[in-house]
Image (cartoon, coloured by chain):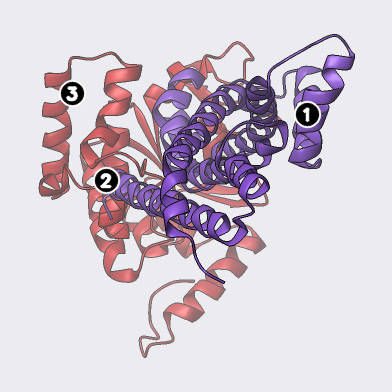
Chain colours: A purple, B red
Amino acid sequence: MTFDFAFILSTLPAFLKAVGVTLQVGLIAIATSLVVALINAPILLYRIPVLHRLVALYVELARNTPLLIQLFFVYFALPALGVKISGFAAAIITMTFLGGAYLTEVLRAGVEAVPVAQLESGRSIGLSELQLLRHVILPQAGLLSLPALFANFIFLLKETTVVSAVAVPEILYTTKSYIALYYKTYEMLAVMTLICVLLFLPLSLLLSRLERRLQHGQFGS
Amino acid sequence: MLRCLNGLETAHGGSLKLEGRELLDPKTDWREVRQQVGMVFQSYHLFGHMTVLDNLLLGPLKVQKRQRAEAVAQAEALLARVGLLDKRDAYPRQLSGGQQQRIAIVRSLCMNPRVMLFDEVTAALDPEMVKEVLQVIQGLARDGMTLLIVTHEMAFARAVADRIVFMEAGRILEQRSPESFFTNPQTARAQQFLEKFSYVESLPEKPQKELI
């Protein structure tokens, strides 16, 4: 077997574009998931009647069904009901559905991890519940959530490969297209693996460094 | 009982009065009461994400809306008094238990309370640090501040207190002057308690500790 480097070179522009698409889908999905989580977490934490049951149901549903099936539902089942959307839109909607559920749990857990004693301590100097939230609970919950938050960001970025199933031209879709067209299976799989490592590993390292820096700065230990 | 006095827990019954005002009234504004009743906890509970100075200023600035310059001046003066002025920019994690507890006391004092509640404030400290915290409390007592102290430091209670309240399972069993409580306890439960305590005290070759 010979490795066709000239062919690999010729595909690089397309892969560069694919990386762009992966990052685009991933980053948009992270942002919209965060918005969903920021709305949902307080609903769970304050146990807002009726709504908190719906949110809990959503979280369980999203976390206990495979992403691929969620994606097929959005892309193939919704048009049958009269809602037609592009592959890209389906990708964002589905990733947000999943990511929102995970991030909701992360934020909820972060707030619940703030020790009760810190709340009593704040109340004992006369802080109102709102001041307590702003000056004690949120800063501490934010720091406590960081590791899980970052882990989930990377998880979402990696899960973008699933959206290749609805023809969004990200890394996996591009790889599969080239394999189907030119039968350069080994070359394309090697390129894909390399891109994934180069893309996700530095990101992983960067985020864990950032996380350490933040904790260090805040707690000064 | 201390937690009831601060509204952290609801009393089952009875009466709590602060300067003639009934606190168990459901209309009590606990936020206002808490500014007059300082509380210090067993495990300090400083805010870990803030520097010492920010811990001290949170109440005065956000709750009492005082001027920053004036609040800082007071906080620094109190820090100097407990010997920790050089720690104003440190984070709680960088401090020893005794230092954190002294900061926690200062945090309460910065609110200019009428009364201070101390909830087993030395129980989580090792013996060397107990002293530095007790000295601070003793200083407050000497200044004439009203202090309610829950403690197992019997010698300290005897030396500093004007009145001893002996409690068991949430009920007051005895309430009298330290001398009469330690030399002549009335209830059987208090006698039993002090006997056990004096037994421990007398272990290190100092049998006559004049208790009982």
Q: Which residue is mark 3?
A: B71
Secondary structure under tag 3 reads: helix
Residue at 77% across, 18% down: A51
Measuring from the top left, give residue A14's x and y in whole percent.
47, 38
Give the quadrant of residue A67: top right
| Mark closer to the chain start, 2 or 1 | 1
Question: Neighbour class for label 1 at 10 Å: few (<14), some, many (≥20)?
Answer: some
Give the quadrant of residue B193: bottom right
Residues at marks 2 and 1 touching, judged by CB atoms closer than 8 Å: no
Residue at 48% across, 25% down: A133
Residue A58's mark? Answer: 1
Question: Neighbour class for label 3 at 10 Å: few (<14), some, many (≥20)?
Answer: many
User: Which residue is outermost to the right?
Assistant: A80
Residue at 51% across, 62% down: B184
Secondary structure under tag 1 reads: helix
Of residues B151 and B175, which is closer to you in this image? Answer: B151
Relative horizontal placement of residue B82, taking residue B32 as reference (left or right)? left
Q: Is residue B156 above or below residue A98?
A: below
User: Which residue is outermost to the bottom?
Assistant: B205
Measuring from the top left, give residue B44's x and y in whole percent.
39, 48
Give the distance between the C-alpha atoms of the residues marked 3 and 1, in whole angstroms: 48 Å
Secondary structure under tag 2 reads: helix
- Amino acid type for the residue under numbered disc 2: Gly
Measuring from the top left, give residue A148's x and y in whole percent.
53, 46
Q: State the quadrant of the C terminus of chain A.
A: bottom left
- Amino acid type for the residue under numbered disc 3: Ala
Give the quadrant of residue A44: top right
Measuring from the top left, give residue B203's x and y in whole percent.
43, 86
Q: Nearer the viewer, mark 2 or mark 1?
A: 1
Give the distance between the C-alpha atoms of the residues marked 3 and 2, in whole angstroms: 25 Å
Q: Which residue is mark 2?
A: A217
